[in-house]
Image (cartoon, rainbow, N blue to C red):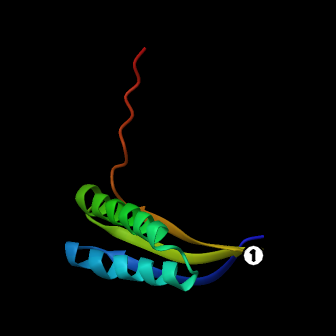
């Protein structure tokens, strides 16, 4: 069973919201003892996702959680926006 140990919801409505979001993700990663390399990977991926939210959906919200299952801990990020989505073209 996964337990949520800590969480924060951040609204991403403008470019200036990206840096505080990145800092909050880093704070959560440091809290669980994530290595510097994995912190960098997580923060880079999170930054790309929020920038895409800004570019294609005019912003949205991001949920940052520390989750635990047994002895393992991790950071889970969930992004939500009201954008048009990705158009799928089907070829016969």
Query: On the image, which quarter does residue 52 sit in?
Result: bottom left
Answer left or right for 88 relative to 35. left
Query: On the image, which quarter does residue 60 sit in?
Result: bottom left
Going 43% across and 77% down the picture, which residue do you hit? 25
Q: Residues within 10 Å of mark 1 (few under 14, many from 20)?
A: few
Q: 25 or 87, which lies in front?
A: 25
Q: Is residue 20 above or below residue 58?
A: below
Q: Is residue 37 above or below residue 66?
A: above
Circle 1 sits on which residue? 71
Percent position of residue 53, x then y: 32, 61
Going 56% across and 80% down the picture, which residue do you hit? 33
Q: Quadrant of the N terminus?
A: bottom right
Q: Quadrant of the C terminus?
A: top left
Q: Is residue 55 above or below residue 36?
A: above
Q: 4 or 31, which lies in front?
A: 31
Disc tally is 1
Answer left or right for 25 relative to 75. left
Question: SS class of the residue under badge 1?
Answer: loop
Q: 16 or 44, which lies in front?
A: 44
For this orientation, the residue located farthest to the top is 92
Percent position of residue 75, x then y: 55, 72
Query: On the image, which quarter does residue 67 sit in?
Result: bottom right
Percent position of residue 28, x then y: 50, 81
Q: 24 or 62, which lies in front?
A: 24
Answer left or right for 67 relative to 77. right
Percent position of residue 47, x then y: 33, 66
């Amino acid at each position: 069973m996964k337990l949520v140990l800590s969480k924060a919801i951040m609204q991403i409505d403008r470019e200036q919201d990206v840096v505080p979001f990145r800092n909050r993700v880093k704070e959560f990663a440091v809290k669980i003892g994530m290595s510097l390399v994995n912190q960098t990977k997580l923060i880079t991926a999170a930054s790309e996702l929020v920038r895409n939210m800004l570019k294609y959906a005019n912003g949205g919200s991001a949920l940052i959680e520390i989750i635990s299952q047994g002895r393992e801990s991790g950071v889970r990020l969930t992004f939500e926006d009201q954008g048009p989505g990705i158009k799928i073209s089907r070829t016969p």
